[in-house]
Amino acid sequence: MSWLDWLIVFVLNGSVIAFGFYLARGTKSSSDWFLGGRSLPWWGLGLSIFATSVDNADAVSLTGYAYNHGMHIITAFTLASVCGAILASFIVVPVLYRGGFYTNAEYLETRYGKSIRTISALIQIQYRTSMLGLMIWSIYLMLQGILEFSPVQCWALIVLLVIFTAAYTTWGGLTSVVWTDALQSLIMMAGGITIFCAVWSASGGWSATVQKLSESTDANGQPLINWLHIGQFQDSQSTSPYLIVIGWTIVGLGYYTVNHTQTMRLMGARSLWDMKMATLFGCLLIMPIMIGTTLMGVMGRVIVPEFTDHSTADQLFPYFANQFLAPGFKGLVVAGILSAAISTFDSIGSALSALFTRDIYARWICTDQTEKHYLKVTRWATIGILLMGFLYIPFIVRYDNMIQAFRTLIPIFVTPLFTIYLLGVLTRVPRESGLVGLLAGSLFGLLGFIDRELVDLEWLSPVLTEKWYAFPCSMIVTTIAMFAAATKWGWLKKEAPLKQKQPEVSPKHDWLSESRQELLEIKLSPFSKPVPQYLNPNWYAILLIAISFWIIFGYFW
Protein backbone atom coordinates (compact mmCIF):
# COMPACT_ATOMS: atom_id res chain seq x y z
CA MET A 1 0.00 0.00 0.00
CA SER A 2 1.03 3.61 -0.54
CA TRP A 3 1.77 6.12 2.20
CA LEU A 4 -1.67 7.64 1.58
CA ASP A 5 -3.33 4.29 2.22
CA TRP A 6 -1.47 3.83 5.48
CA LEU A 7 -2.33 7.38 6.56
CA ILE A 8 -6.03 6.72 5.99
CA VAL A 9 -5.87 3.45 7.93
CA PHE A 10 -4.10 4.96 10.94
CA VAL A 11 -6.18 8.16 11.07
CA LEU A 12 -9.56 6.43 10.76
CA ASN A 13 -8.97 3.39 12.95
CA GLY A 14 -6.74 5.22 15.41
CA SER A 15 -9.34 7.95 15.92
CA VAL A 16 -12.04 5.40 16.71
CA ILE A 17 -9.87 3.60 19.27
CA ALA A 18 -8.94 6.92 20.88
CA PHE A 19 -12.63 7.83 21.03
CA GLY A 20 -13.29 4.53 22.79
CA PHE A 21 -10.77 5.40 25.51
CA TYR A 22 -12.37 8.83 25.87
CA LEU A 23 -15.84 7.37 26.36
CA ALA A 24 -14.58 4.82 28.86
CA ARG A 25 -14.07 7.54 31.47
CA GLY A 26 -17.81 7.73 32.12
CA THR A 27 -18.27 4.08 33.11
CA LYS A 28 -18.77 3.89 36.89
CA SER A 29 -21.22 1.11 37.75
CA SER A 30 -22.44 -2.34 36.72
CA SER A 31 -25.38 -0.96 34.76
CA ASP A 32 -23.00 1.39 32.92
CA TRP A 33 -20.59 -1.39 31.95
CA PHE A 34 -23.05 -4.16 31.13
CA LEU A 35 -26.04 -2.22 29.74
CA GLY A 36 -24.87 1.32 29.08
CA GLY A 37 -27.17 2.52 31.87
CA ARG A 38 -30.16 1.62 29.69
CA SER A 39 -29.78 4.97 27.98
CA LEU A 40 -28.85 4.06 24.39
CA PRO A 41 -30.97 5.52 21.53
CA TRP A 42 -32.23 3.52 18.57
CA TRP A 43 -29.98 5.04 15.92
CA GLY A 44 -26.78 4.42 17.89
CA LEU A 45 -27.83 0.87 18.68
CA GLY A 46 -28.84 0.30 15.05
CA LEU A 47 -25.41 1.36 13.79
CA SER A 48 -23.79 -0.84 16.44
CA ILE A 49 -25.97 -3.83 15.47
CA PHE A 50 -24.87 -3.34 11.87
CA ALA A 51 -21.18 -3.07 12.79
CA THR A 52 -21.34 -6.17 14.97
CA SER A 53 -23.27 -8.26 12.43
CA VAL A 54 -21.02 -7.36 9.49
CA ASP A 55 -17.55 -8.45 10.51
CA ASN A 56 -14.32 -8.77 8.56
CA ALA A 57 -14.80 -12.53 8.22
CA ASP A 58 -17.96 -11.83 6.20
CA ALA A 59 -16.08 -9.70 3.70
CA VAL A 60 -13.44 -12.34 3.07
CA SER A 61 -15.52 -15.50 3.40
CA LEU A 62 -18.75 -14.35 1.73
CA THR A 63 -17.05 -13.53 -1.55
CA GLY A 64 -15.32 -16.91 -1.53
CA TYR A 65 -18.46 -18.77 -0.50
CA ALA A 66 -20.62 -17.09 -3.18
CA TYR A 67 -17.95 -17.82 -5.80
CA ASN A 68 -18.41 -21.55 -5.13
CA HIS A 69 -22.03 -21.76 -3.94
CA GLY A 70 -23.98 -18.85 -5.38
CA MET A 71 -26.34 -16.38 -3.76
CA HIS A 72 -28.33 -18.54 -1.35
CA ILE A 73 -26.34 -17.33 1.65
CA ILE A 74 -27.98 -13.90 1.36
CA THR A 75 -30.97 -15.57 3.04
CA ALA A 76 -29.03 -15.32 6.31
CA PHE A 77 -28.64 -11.55 5.94
CA THR A 78 -32.07 -10.67 4.57
CA LEU A 79 -35.07 -12.85 5.39
CA ALA A 80 -33.41 -14.67 8.28
CA SER A 81 -31.82 -11.55 9.75
CA VAL A 82 -35.03 -9.53 9.56
CA CYS A 83 -37.22 -12.29 11.03
CA GLY A 84 -34.64 -13.08 13.73
CA ALA A 85 -34.27 -9.43 14.70
CA ILE A 86 -38.05 -8.94 14.89
CA LEU A 87 -38.51 -12.14 16.88
CA ALA A 88 -35.86 -11.02 19.36
CA SER A 89 -36.79 -7.34 19.76
CA PHE A 90 -40.58 -7.69 19.58
CA ILE A 91 -41.10 -10.95 21.52
CA VAL A 92 -38.10 -12.55 23.28
CA VAL A 93 -35.85 -9.74 24.57
CA PRO A 94 -38.72 -7.57 25.94
CA VAL A 95 -39.39 -10.41 28.41
CA LEU A 96 -35.77 -10.19 29.57
CA TYR A 97 -35.86 -6.38 29.56
CA ARG A 98 -38.95 -6.19 31.76
CA GLY A 99 -37.53 -8.84 34.08
CA GLY A 100 -34.48 -6.71 34.89
CA PHE A 101 -31.98 -9.22 33.58
CA TYR A 102 -28.44 -8.34 32.51
CA THR A 103 -27.83 -11.38 30.28
CA ASN A 104 -29.97 -13.69 28.21
CA ALA A 105 -28.63 -16.67 30.17
CA GLU A 106 -29.80 -15.07 33.42
CA TYR A 107 -33.39 -15.33 32.18
CA LEU A 108 -33.02 -19.08 31.69
CA GLU A 109 -32.48 -19.66 35.41
CA THR A 110 -35.83 -18.03 36.11
CA ARG A 111 -37.48 -20.07 33.38
CA TYR A 112 -35.73 -23.45 33.60
CA GLY A 113 -33.29 -23.54 36.51
CA LYS A 114 -29.65 -22.92 37.44
CA SER A 115 -28.07 -25.61 35.29
CA ILE A 116 -29.57 -24.24 32.06
CA ARG A 117 -28.26 -20.76 32.85
CA THR A 118 -24.71 -22.07 33.19
CA ILE A 119 -24.91 -24.35 30.15
CA SER A 120 -26.30 -21.47 28.07
CA ALA A 121 -23.39 -19.24 29.07
CA LEU A 122 -20.86 -21.95 28.16
CA ILE A 123 -22.54 -22.63 24.80
CA GLN A 124 -22.54 -18.95 23.90
CA ILE A 125 -18.89 -18.60 24.86
CA GLN A 126 -18.03 -21.54 22.60
CA TYR A 127 -20.30 -20.27 19.80
CA ARG A 128 -18.98 -16.72 19.65
CA THR A 129 -15.30 -17.47 20.34
CA SER A 130 -15.44 -19.71 17.26
CA MET A 131 -16.58 -16.59 15.40
CA LEU A 132 -13.57 -14.77 16.81
CA GLY A 133 -11.40 -17.47 15.30
CA LEU A 134 -13.00 -16.88 11.90
CA MET A 135 -12.31 -13.16 12.15
CA ILE A 136 -8.72 -13.64 13.21
CA TRP A 137 -8.10 -16.00 10.29
CA SER A 138 -9.78 -13.64 7.82
CA ILE A 139 -7.60 -10.75 9.02
CA TYR A 140 -4.58 -12.98 8.49
CA LEU A 141 -5.68 -13.75 4.91
CA MET A 142 -6.38 -10.08 4.26
CA LEU A 143 -3.01 -8.91 5.61
CA GLN A 144 -1.18 -11.51 3.55
CA GLY A 145 -3.22 -10.89 0.43
CA ILE A 146 -3.47 -7.11 0.40
CA LEU A 147 -0.44 -5.96 2.40
CA GLU A 148 1.82 -8.89 1.49
CA PHE A 149 3.00 -9.22 5.09
CA SER A 150 5.03 -12.18 6.30
CA PRO A 151 3.29 -14.61 8.72
CA VAL A 152 5.19 -13.14 11.66
CA GLN A 153 4.18 -9.58 10.73
CA CYS A 154 0.57 -10.65 10.25
CA TRP A 155 0.26 -12.31 13.63
CA ALA A 156 2.08 -9.46 15.39
CA LEU A 157 -0.35 -6.90 13.94
CA ILE A 158 -3.37 -9.07 14.81
CA VAL A 159 -2.21 -9.41 18.42
CA LEU A 160 -1.74 -5.63 18.66
CA LEU A 161 -5.24 -5.09 17.25
CA VAL A 162 -6.71 -7.42 19.86
CA ILE A 163 -4.78 -5.68 22.66
CA PHE A 164 -5.96 -2.16 21.70
CA THR A 165 -9.55 -3.37 21.30
CA ALA A 166 -9.47 -5.16 24.64
CA ALA A 167 -8.07 -2.06 26.34
CA TYR A 168 -10.95 0.34 25.67
CA THR A 169 -13.56 -2.42 25.90
CA THR A 170 -12.44 -3.57 29.34
CA TRP A 171 -12.45 -0.01 30.62
CA GLY A 172 -15.65 1.36 29.11
CA GLY A 173 -18.03 -1.56 28.63
CA LEU A 174 -21.16 -1.32 26.47
CA THR A 175 -21.22 2.47 26.17
CA SER A 176 -17.74 2.59 24.64
CA VAL A 177 -18.53 -0.41 22.46
CA VAL A 178 -21.78 0.96 21.02
CA TRP A 179 -20.52 4.43 20.17
CA THR A 180 -17.21 3.26 18.70
CA ASP A 181 -19.22 0.71 16.69
CA ALA A 182 -21.42 3.54 15.40
CA LEU A 183 -18.37 5.38 14.06
CA GLN A 184 -16.83 2.21 12.69
CA SER A 185 -20.04 1.37 10.84
CA LEU A 186 -19.59 4.53 8.75
CA ILE A 187 -16.04 3.52 7.82
CA MET A 188 -17.23 0.00 7.01
CA MET A 189 -19.99 1.25 4.72
CA ALA A 190 -17.62 3.60 2.92
CA GLY A 191 -15.07 0.80 2.39
CA GLY A 192 -17.74 -1.69 1.30
CA ILE A 193 -19.27 0.66 -1.24
CA THR A 194 -15.81 1.53 -2.58
CA ILE A 195 -14.72 -2.02 -3.35
CA PHE A 196 -18.16 -3.02 -4.65
CA CYS A 197 -18.09 -0.17 -7.18
CA ALA A 198 -14.59 -1.16 -8.27
CA VAL A 199 -15.59 -4.83 -8.78
CA TRP A 200 -18.84 -3.81 -10.49
CA SER A 201 -16.86 -1.70 -12.96
CA ALA A 202 -14.34 -4.50 -13.57
CA SER A 203 -17.13 -6.97 -14.33
CA GLY A 204 -18.69 -4.63 -16.90
CA GLY A 205 -21.83 -4.00 -14.88
CA TRP A 206 -24.97 -6.04 -14.30
CA SER A 207 -25.93 -6.74 -17.92
CA ALA A 208 -22.43 -7.88 -18.85
CA THR A 209 -22.20 -10.10 -15.76
CA VAL A 210 -25.53 -11.79 -16.51
CA GLN A 211 -24.57 -12.34 -20.15
CA LYS A 212 -21.18 -13.87 -19.33
CA LEU A 213 -22.66 -16.11 -16.65
CA SER A 214 -25.34 -17.28 -19.09
CA GLU A 215 -22.65 -18.32 -21.56
CA SER A 216 -20.55 -20.32 -19.06
CA THR A 217 -20.81 -23.49 -16.99
CA ASP A 218 -18.90 -24.89 -14.04
CA ALA A 219 -16.80 -28.06 -14.07
CA ASN A 220 -19.94 -30.17 -13.64
CA GLY A 221 -21.77 -28.56 -16.51
CA GLN A 222 -24.12 -26.44 -14.39
CA PRO A 223 -24.85 -23.03 -15.98
CA LEU A 224 -23.17 -20.27 -14.02
CA ILE A 225 -26.29 -18.13 -14.32
CA ASN A 226 -27.72 -20.42 -11.62
CA TRP A 227 -25.33 -18.74 -9.18
CA LEU A 228 -27.64 -15.71 -9.30
CA HIS A 229 -30.81 -17.75 -8.74
CA ILE A 230 -31.32 -19.46 -5.39
CA GLY A 231 -34.11 -21.65 -6.74
CA GLN A 232 -32.03 -23.01 -9.63
CA PHE A 233 -28.61 -23.53 -8.05
CA GLN A 234 -27.71 -27.16 -7.34
CA ASP A 235 -25.01 -28.04 -4.84
CA SER A 236 -22.97 -31.26 -5.01
CA GLN A 237 -25.74 -33.18 -3.21
CA SER A 238 -28.66 -31.64 -5.18
CA THR A 239 -30.15 -30.25 -1.98
CA SER A 240 -33.56 -28.62 -2.28
CA PRO A 241 -33.21 -24.83 -2.39
CA TYR A 242 -36.13 -24.58 0.01
CA LEU A 243 -34.22 -26.68 2.55
CA ILE A 244 -31.17 -24.45 2.16
CA VAL A 245 -33.32 -21.36 2.74
CA ILE A 246 -34.84 -22.99 5.83
CA GLY A 247 -31.36 -23.80 7.16
CA TRP A 248 -30.09 -20.25 6.77
CA THR A 249 -33.32 -18.90 8.24
CA ILE A 250 -32.86 -20.97 11.40
CA VAL A 251 -29.28 -19.67 11.68
CA GLY A 252 -30.54 -16.08 11.39
CA LEU A 253 -33.44 -16.58 13.78
CA GLY A 254 -31.13 -17.84 16.50
CA TYR A 255 -28.48 -15.17 15.94
CA TYR A 256 -30.33 -12.36 17.71
CA THR A 257 -31.57 -14.49 20.64
CA VAL A 258 -28.75 -16.92 21.49
CA ASN A 259 -26.04 -14.40 20.63
CA HIS A 260 -25.57 -12.11 23.64
CA THR A 261 -23.51 -9.67 21.58
CA GLN A 262 -26.88 -8.59 20.15
CA THR A 263 -29.19 -9.15 23.14
CA MET A 264 -26.78 -7.12 25.29
CA ARG A 265 -27.32 -4.15 22.99
CA LEU A 266 -31.08 -4.53 22.94
CA MET A 267 -31.20 -4.74 26.74
CA GLY A 268 -29.27 -1.46 26.90
CA ALA A 269 -31.93 0.45 24.93
CA ARG A 270 -33.50 3.46 26.63
CA SER A 271 -37.00 2.16 25.83
CA LEU A 272 -38.83 -0.77 24.24
CA TRP A 273 -39.56 1.43 21.22
CA ASP A 274 -35.83 2.14 20.79
CA MET A 275 -35.13 -1.59 21.03
CA LYS A 276 -37.49 -2.40 18.16
CA MET A 277 -36.44 0.48 15.94
CA ALA A 278 -32.76 -0.29 16.51
CA THR A 279 -33.04 -3.81 15.11
CA LEU A 280 -35.08 -2.64 12.12
CA PHE A 281 -32.56 0.11 11.36
CA GLY A 282 -29.68 -2.33 11.75
CA CYS A 283 -31.29 -4.83 9.36
CA LEU A 284 -31.97 -2.08 6.85
CA LEU A 285 -28.24 -1.31 6.79
CA ILE A 286 -27.14 -4.94 6.79
CA MET A 287 -29.14 -6.08 3.75
CA PRO A 288 -27.61 -3.96 0.93
CA ILE A 289 -24.04 -4.29 2.21
CA MET A 290 -24.21 -8.07 2.52
CA ILE A 291 -26.01 -8.54 -0.79
CA GLY A 292 -23.32 -6.44 -2.45
CA THR A 293 -20.54 -8.43 -0.78
CA THR A 294 -22.12 -11.70 -1.94
CA LEU A 295 -22.59 -10.39 -5.47
CA MET A 296 -18.87 -9.67 -5.65
CA GLY A 297 -18.25 -13.39 -5.23
CA VAL A 298 -20.57 -14.21 -8.14
CA MET A 299 -18.96 -11.48 -10.24
CA GLY A 300 -15.66 -13.18 -9.52
CA ARG A 301 -16.85 -16.05 -11.73
CA VAL A 302 -16.75 -13.58 -14.61
CA ILE A 303 -13.64 -11.62 -13.66
CA VAL A 304 -11.34 -14.41 -12.43
CA PRO A 305 -12.61 -17.84 -13.52
CA GLU A 306 -9.27 -19.34 -12.47
CA PHE A 307 -10.33 -19.18 -8.80
CA THR A 308 -12.03 -22.54 -9.23
CA ASP A 309 -9.95 -24.31 -6.59
CA HIS A 310 -12.05 -24.19 -3.40
CA SER A 311 -8.97 -23.78 -1.24
CA THR A 312 -8.23 -20.38 -2.82
CA ALA A 313 -11.75 -18.91 -2.83
CA ASP A 314 -11.16 -16.99 0.40
CA GLN A 315 -8.32 -15.16 -1.38
CA LEU A 316 -10.81 -13.56 -3.77
CA PHE A 317 -11.50 -10.44 -1.70
CA PRO A 318 -7.80 -9.57 -1.22
CA TYR A 319 -7.32 -10.17 -4.97
CA PHE A 320 -10.06 -7.66 -5.80
CA ALA A 321 -8.54 -5.07 -3.45
CA ASN A 322 -5.09 -5.45 -5.02
CA GLN A 323 -6.23 -5.44 -8.63
CA PHE A 324 -8.97 -2.82 -8.76
CA LEU A 325 -8.35 -0.22 -6.04
CA ALA A 326 -6.28 2.90 -6.60
CA PRO A 327 -4.11 4.44 -3.84
CA GLY A 328 -6.28 5.99 -1.17
CA PHE A 329 -9.25 3.77 -1.98
CA LYS A 330 -7.31 0.68 -0.94
CA GLY A 331 -6.56 2.34 2.40
CA LEU A 332 -10.26 3.10 2.88
CA VAL A 333 -11.19 -0.53 2.23
CA VAL A 334 -8.50 -1.84 4.61
CA ALA A 335 -9.68 0.65 7.24
CA GLY A 336 -13.21 -0.68 6.74
CA ILE A 337 -12.05 -4.28 7.17
CA LEU A 338 -10.15 -3.41 10.35
CA SER A 339 -13.16 -1.45 11.65
CA ALA A 340 -15.32 -4.51 11.05
CA ALA A 341 -12.86 -6.61 13.04
CA ILE A 342 -12.57 -4.13 15.90
CA SER A 343 -16.34 -3.62 16.18
CA THR A 344 -16.96 -7.36 16.47
CA PHE A 345 -13.95 -7.95 18.73
CA ASP A 346 -15.21 -5.40 21.25
CA SER A 347 -18.78 -6.66 21.01
CA ILE A 348 -17.91 -10.31 21.54
CA GLY A 349 -15.39 -9.50 24.26
CA SER A 350 -17.82 -7.40 26.31
CA ALA A 351 -20.81 -9.73 25.84
CA LEU A 352 -19.04 -12.99 26.65
CA SER A 353 -17.21 -11.52 29.63
CA ALA A 354 -20.61 -10.42 30.95
CA LEU A 355 -21.85 -13.99 30.60
CA PHE A 356 -18.78 -15.37 32.34
CA THR A 357 -18.92 -12.93 35.25
CA ARG A 358 -22.66 -12.91 35.96
CA ASP A 359 -23.68 -16.43 34.94
CA ILE A 360 -20.64 -18.46 35.96
CA TYR A 361 -18.22 -16.61 38.24
CA ALA A 362 -20.63 -14.62 40.44
CA ARG A 363 -23.26 -17.36 40.38
CA TRP A 364 -21.06 -20.34 41.24
CA ILE A 365 -17.40 -19.51 41.97
CA CYS A 366 -17.35 -16.33 44.05
CA THR A 367 -20.79 -15.25 45.23
CA ASP A 368 -20.18 -12.65 47.96
CA GLN A 369 -17.86 -9.98 46.60
CA THR A 370 -18.37 -6.28 45.86
CA GLU A 371 -19.25 -4.56 42.61
CA LYS A 372 -15.67 -3.32 42.26
CA HIS A 373 -14.39 -6.90 42.41
CA TYR A 374 -16.82 -8.17 39.77
CA LEU A 375 -16.09 -5.31 37.38
CA LYS A 376 -12.39 -6.13 37.70
CA VAL A 377 -13.09 -9.78 36.93
CA THR A 378 -15.19 -8.77 33.93
CA ARG A 379 -12.39 -6.66 32.51
CA TRP A 380 -9.85 -9.47 32.83
CA ALA A 381 -12.37 -11.92 31.38
CA THR A 382 -12.71 -9.70 28.31
CA ILE A 383 -9.03 -10.16 27.56
CA GLY A 384 -9.25 -13.91 28.09
CA ILE A 385 -12.29 -14.21 25.80
CA LEU A 386 -10.53 -12.40 22.96
CA LEU A 387 -7.48 -14.64 23.27
CA MET A 388 -9.66 -17.77 23.09
CA GLY A 389 -10.43 -17.03 19.45
CA PHE A 390 -6.91 -18.09 18.49
CA LEU A 391 -7.64 -21.66 19.65
CA TYR A 392 -10.02 -22.25 16.73
CA ILE A 393 -7.53 -21.48 13.96
CA PRO A 394 -6.37 -25.13 13.50
CA PHE A 395 -10.02 -26.24 13.11
CA ILE A 396 -10.94 -23.45 10.68
CA VAL A 397 -8.06 -24.04 8.27
CA ARG A 398 -9.29 -27.61 7.67
CA TYR A 399 -12.26 -26.31 5.67
CA ASP A 400 -12.50 -25.07 2.10
CA ASN A 401 -14.24 -21.92 3.27
CA MET A 402 -14.61 -20.25 6.67
CA ILE A 403 -18.40 -20.18 6.51
CA GLN A 404 -18.50 -23.95 6.11
CA ALA A 405 -16.51 -24.30 9.34
CA PHE A 406 -18.87 -21.95 11.19
CA ARG A 407 -22.03 -23.59 9.80
CA THR A 408 -20.82 -27.04 10.89
CA LEU A 409 -20.73 -26.04 14.57
CA ILE A 410 -24.10 -24.28 14.91
CA PRO A 411 -26.49 -27.29 14.91
CA ILE A 412 -24.62 -28.97 17.76
CA PHE A 413 -25.55 -26.66 20.64
CA VAL A 414 -26.75 -23.30 19.31
CA THR A 415 -29.91 -24.48 17.54
CA PRO A 416 -31.16 -26.52 20.54
CA LEU A 417 -30.45 -23.53 22.82
CA PHE A 418 -32.41 -21.22 20.53
CA THR A 419 -35.31 -23.69 20.59
CA ILE A 420 -35.55 -23.69 24.39
CA TYR A 421 -35.45 -19.87 24.46
CA LEU A 422 -38.27 -19.79 21.93
CA LEU A 423 -40.45 -22.37 23.65
CA GLY A 424 -39.73 -20.80 27.03
CA VAL A 425 -41.18 -17.48 25.93
CA LEU A 426 -43.98 -18.71 23.66
CA THR A 427 -45.25 -21.81 25.52
CA ARG A 428 -45.87 -23.08 29.06
CA VAL A 429 -43.47 -26.02 28.97
CA PRO A 430 -42.34 -26.96 32.52
CA ARG A 431 -39.02 -25.94 34.07
CA GLU A 432 -37.68 -29.50 33.78
CA SER A 433 -38.17 -29.46 30.00
CA GLY A 434 -35.29 -27.05 29.45
CA LEU A 435 -32.56 -29.46 30.48
CA VAL A 436 -34.31 -32.40 28.80
CA GLY A 437 -34.65 -30.53 25.49
CA LEU A 438 -31.12 -29.14 25.54
CA LEU A 439 -29.59 -32.55 26.29
CA ALA A 440 -31.64 -34.27 23.59
CA GLY A 441 -30.93 -31.62 20.96
CA SER A 442 -27.23 -31.41 21.80
CA LEU A 443 -26.81 -35.20 21.75
CA PHE A 444 -28.45 -35.27 18.34
CA GLY A 445 -26.17 -32.43 17.20
CA LEU A 446 -23.05 -34.23 18.41
CA LEU A 447 -24.06 -37.45 16.66
CA GLY A 448 -24.67 -35.48 13.47
CA PHE A 449 -21.28 -33.78 13.73
CA ILE A 450 -19.55 -37.15 14.23
CA ASP A 451 -21.45 -38.61 11.27
CA ARG A 452 -20.67 -35.64 8.97
CA GLU A 453 -17.11 -34.89 9.96
CA LEU A 454 -15.44 -37.85 11.69
CA VAL A 455 -16.91 -41.33 11.28
CA ASP A 456 -19.78 -42.44 9.05
CA LEU A 457 -22.43 -43.84 11.39
CA GLU A 458 -24.21 -46.31 9.14
CA TRP A 459 -27.13 -46.79 11.53
CA LEU A 460 -27.91 -43.04 11.46
CA SER A 461 -29.82 -41.81 8.42
CA PRO A 462 -27.99 -39.06 6.50
CA VAL A 463 -31.39 -37.34 6.14
CA LEU A 464 -31.16 -36.50 9.84
CA THR A 465 -27.53 -35.38 9.95
CA GLU A 466 -26.76 -33.89 6.52
CA LYS A 467 -25.57 -30.30 6.87
CA TRP A 468 -28.86 -28.69 5.79
CA TYR A 469 -31.24 -31.20 7.35
CA ALA A 470 -29.40 -30.81 10.66
CA PHE A 471 -30.93 -27.40 11.39
CA PRO A 472 -34.66 -28.23 11.25
CA CYS A 473 -34.07 -31.73 12.65
CA SER A 474 -32.26 -30.24 15.65
CA MET A 475 -35.23 -27.97 16.40
CA ILE A 476 -37.67 -30.85 15.96
CA VAL A 477 -35.75 -33.21 18.26
CA THR A 478 -35.44 -30.51 20.95
CA THR A 479 -39.13 -29.60 20.69
CA ILE A 480 -40.30 -33.23 20.90
CA ALA A 481 -38.14 -33.80 23.98
CA MET A 482 -39.53 -30.69 25.68
CA PHE A 483 -43.14 -31.61 24.88
CA ALA A 484 -42.48 -35.12 26.16
CA ALA A 485 -41.21 -33.58 29.40
CA ALA A 486 -44.43 -31.57 29.58
CA THR A 487 -46.48 -34.76 29.44
CA LYS A 488 -44.53 -36.09 32.42
CA TRP A 489 -44.28 -32.99 34.64
CA GLY A 490 -47.30 -31.09 33.36
CA TRP A 491 -47.64 -27.65 31.79
CA LEU A 492 -47.03 -24.51 33.82
CA LYS A 493 -49.83 -22.23 34.80
CA LYS A 494 -50.27 -19.27 32.48
CA GLU A 495 -48.48 -16.70 34.64
CA ALA A 496 -45.68 -18.96 35.91
CA PRO A 497 -43.05 -18.49 33.16
CA LEU A 498 -42.87 -14.73 33.77
CA LYS A 499 -42.44 -14.88 37.54
CA GLN A 500 -38.94 -14.17 38.78
CA LYS A 501 -37.49 -16.62 41.24
CA GLN A 502 -34.63 -15.12 43.16
CA PRO A 503 -31.65 -17.50 43.40
CA GLU A 504 -30.16 -18.52 46.72
CA VAL A 505 -27.60 -15.92 47.77
CA SER A 506 -24.82 -15.40 50.28
CA PRO A 507 -25.68 -13.41 53.40
CA LYS A 508 -22.71 -11.06 52.86
CA HIS A 509 -23.30 -9.64 49.40
CA ASP A 510 -25.76 -10.24 46.60
CA TRP A 511 -24.26 -8.32 43.73
CA LEU A 512 -26.40 -10.08 41.13
CA SER A 513 -29.59 -8.81 42.76
CA GLU A 514 -28.17 -5.48 43.94
CA SER A 515 -27.04 -4.55 40.43
CA ARG A 516 -30.60 -4.93 39.19
CA GLN A 517 -31.61 -2.04 41.44
CA GLU A 518 -29.34 0.26 39.43
CA LEU A 519 -31.42 -0.16 36.30
CA LEU A 520 -33.54 2.77 35.18
CA GLU A 521 -37.31 2.55 35.10
CA ILE A 522 -38.65 0.73 32.04
CA LYS A 523 -39.96 3.05 29.34
CA LEU A 524 -42.28 2.06 26.54
CA SER A 525 -40.97 4.88 24.33
CA PRO A 526 -38.86 8.06 24.60
CA PHE A 527 -41.87 10.23 23.73
CA SER A 528 -43.99 12.06 26.29
CA LYS A 529 -47.08 11.37 24.17
CA PRO A 530 -48.31 8.18 22.46
CA VAL A 531 -46.10 7.04 19.57
CA PRO A 532 -47.38 8.47 16.25
CA GLN A 533 -48.55 5.89 13.72
CA TYR A 534 -45.83 6.86 11.25
CA LEU A 535 -43.26 5.91 13.92
CA ASN A 536 -44.96 2.63 14.85
CA PRO A 537 -42.28 -0.12 14.57
CA ASN A 538 -44.91 -2.65 13.48
CA TRP A 539 -45.35 -1.00 10.08
CA TYR A 540 -41.61 -0.93 9.41
CA ALA A 541 -41.31 -4.57 10.50
CA ILE A 542 -44.00 -5.64 8.03
CA LEU A 543 -42.31 -3.62 5.26
CA LEU A 544 -38.88 -5.16 5.92
CA ILE A 545 -40.31 -8.68 5.97
CA ALA A 546 -42.07 -8.04 2.64
CA ILE A 547 -38.88 -6.66 1.07
CA SER A 548 -36.77 -9.58 2.29
CA PHE A 549 -39.31 -12.10 0.98
CA TRP A 550 -39.22 -10.38 -2.42
CA ILE A 551 -35.40 -10.45 -2.44
CA ILE A 552 -35.23 -14.20 -1.78
CA PHE A 553 -38.33 -15.59 -3.49
CA GLY A 554 -38.63 -12.92 -6.16
CA TYR A 555 -35.56 -11.16 -7.50
CA PHE A 556 -32.92 -13.82 -6.73
CA TRP A 557 -35.07 -16.93 -6.96
Image (cartoon, rainbow, N blue to C red):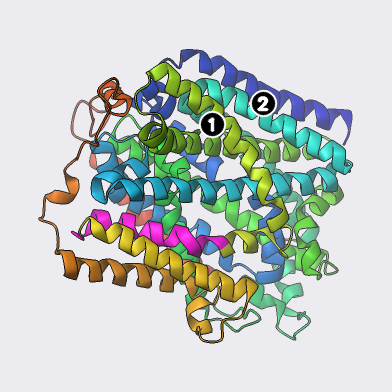
Residue at 61% across, 37% down: 386
Q: Quadrant of residue 83?
A: bottom left
Residue located beneath label 1 in the image: 381
Return the residue at label 2.
164
Part of the protein shown in magenta? 409-429
- Residue 200, image x and y in percent? 73, 56
Residue at 29%, 25% in the rendered image: 510
Q: Is residue 252 left or right of residue 195?
A: left
Of residue 288 and residue 348, the one placed in the foreground of this image is 348
Q: First in sequence, mark 1 or 2: give its number.
A: 2
**Residue 192 shows in the view:** no
The residues bearing labels 1 and 2 have C-alpha atoms spaced at a distance of 15 Å
Query: Magenta stretch containing residue 420, yes or no?
Result: yes
| Contact check, label 1 and label 2, Cβ < 8 Å | no
Q: Secondary structure at mark 1?
A: helix
Q: Residues within 10 Å of mark 2 (few under 14, many from 20)?
A: some
Residue 318's place in the image compared with 480, above or below, is above
Q: Is residue 129 magenta?
A: no
Q: Nearer the viewer, residue 265 or 438?
A: 438
Secondary structure of the residue carrying numbered label 2: helix
Which amino acid type is shown beneath numbered disc 1?
Ala
Q: Quadrant of residue 327?
A: top right
- Secondary structure mostly seen in magenta is helix
In the image, what residue occupies the spot 69% across and 44% down? 136
| Quadrant position of the N terminus in the picture | top right
Give the residue displayed 52% in from the left and 18% down from the top. 24
* Coordinates of residue 4 in the picture (x, y in percent): 84, 29
Residue 38 screen position, x and y as percent: 34, 27
Amino acid type for the residue under numbered disc 2: Phe
Image position, residue 448 (x, y; %)? 52, 73
The vertical placement of 236 against 15, above or below, is: below
Picture quadrant where residue 450 is located: bottom right
